Amino acid sequence: MAVSKISLGSVKQLFAKRRDRLSTQLLALGLIITASFIAIAIFAPLLQAIGLLQDPQDLLGSPMPPYNPINQAPSAQHWFGTSREGYDVFSRTLFGTQAALQVVVLATLMSLLIGVPLGMVSGYLGGNLDRVLLFVMDTIYTLPGLLLSVTLAFIVGKGVFNAAIALSISYIPQYFRVVRNQTASLKTQMFVEAAQALGASTRHVLTKYLFANVVQSVPVLFTLNAADAILVLGGLGFLGLGLPDEVAEWGHDLKQALPALSTGIWWTTLFPGLALTLMVTGLSLLGEGLSELINPRDRQR
């Protein structure tokens, strides 16, 4: 019986070590992919400035012989080929990273800056304010995120800031609910009651004693929301509701390339779609890896 227990314990430890190793590897992979896209977004304008990269808004050459830049297959001159409008696909794919990061980071920051303070105030004060905010946030949360973003994008119009607003609304309830629940559970702890007994103000308790304890899950939620926001932004661009048409954006480029796909022009859809998929995968792996590190109890369960 003792041998069986020891063997079972050894097997559990072995699987736990392998799971930890796999989680670390996935986190590292997600970090590498995400850092690569950030580097691309930063250095793409520099490469364009020194002439190593085409302007993503410039049409190439002339549509008349001897050089026709439309729908050229990948080559040494155009690594990802050209589109039916005459754009360089490689350049637009790289600059699409910049557009995606600008909108997604702005959208997630806006939702974080609104959802976290509201969640802390609601969870700490409670009462009617808590009930009203819960009702509003639950109402927003029940709406499909893509449908809500499409509706708001149609109302506010195109642009980086407008697209960020359309994306951020659906993520505010997520930050609110996580932070509100953690605040409500921590406000009864001894260290909070001691601060209250010493005469600490509500603002002081929230900022000094509760903030650091309730935002531990926010980085995980931030990365996962960023991954989802990239997909939603691609959907908005595909519907023509994201960024202006002249801006290089993956969803818009996929929409423009779709009619040519049936004729064998595969490169105009492959590379923007592959970039979008890789960026979402990297952020998802990063978020899951951070969750494993920040919440070891969940990993043990």
Image (tube, helix red, strand yellow):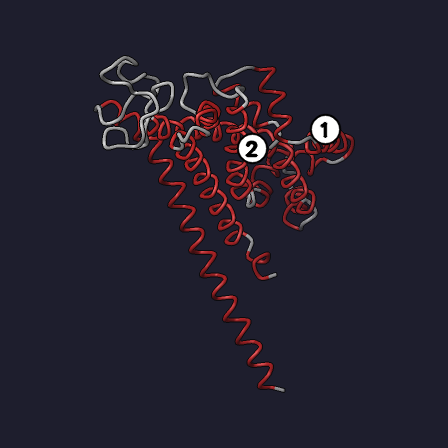
Picture quarter containing residue 57? top left
Residue 112: give its label: 2
Disc 2 vs disc 1: Cβ atoms closer than 8 Å?
no
Q: Secondary structure at mark 1?
A: helix
From the image, which quarter does the N terminus lie in? bottom right
Nearest the eye: 279 or 261: 261
Distance in Å between CA atoms under marks 2 and 1: 17 Å
Q: Is residue 236 left or right of residue 272?
A: right
Residue to which mark 1 is pinned: 136
For marks 2 and 1, the one nearer the N-term is 2
Q: Residue at x 69, y 38 (%)?
A: 123
Q: Is residue 44 left or right of residue 196?
A: left
Q: Residue 192 location in percent, x, y?
A: 65, 45
| Amino acid type, mark 1 | Val
| Amino acid type, mark 2 | Leu
Q: Residue at x 35, y 40 (%)?
A: 36
From the image, which quarter does the C terminus lie in? bottom right
Q: Residue 152 location in percent, x, y?
A: 61, 20
Nearest the eye: 6 or 52: 52
Q: Residue at x 56, y 33 (%)?
A: 112
Look at the picture and state if 237 lies above or below 274. above
Picture quarter containing residue 221? top right
Q: Residue 171 location in percent, x, y?
A: 60, 32
Look at the picture and state if 159 lies above or below 190. above
For mark 2, does the 10 Å Cα neighbourhood hold few (<14), some (14 to 19), or many (20 or more) residues? Answer: many
Q: Secondary structure at mark 2?
A: helix
Residue ranking furthest to the front:
263
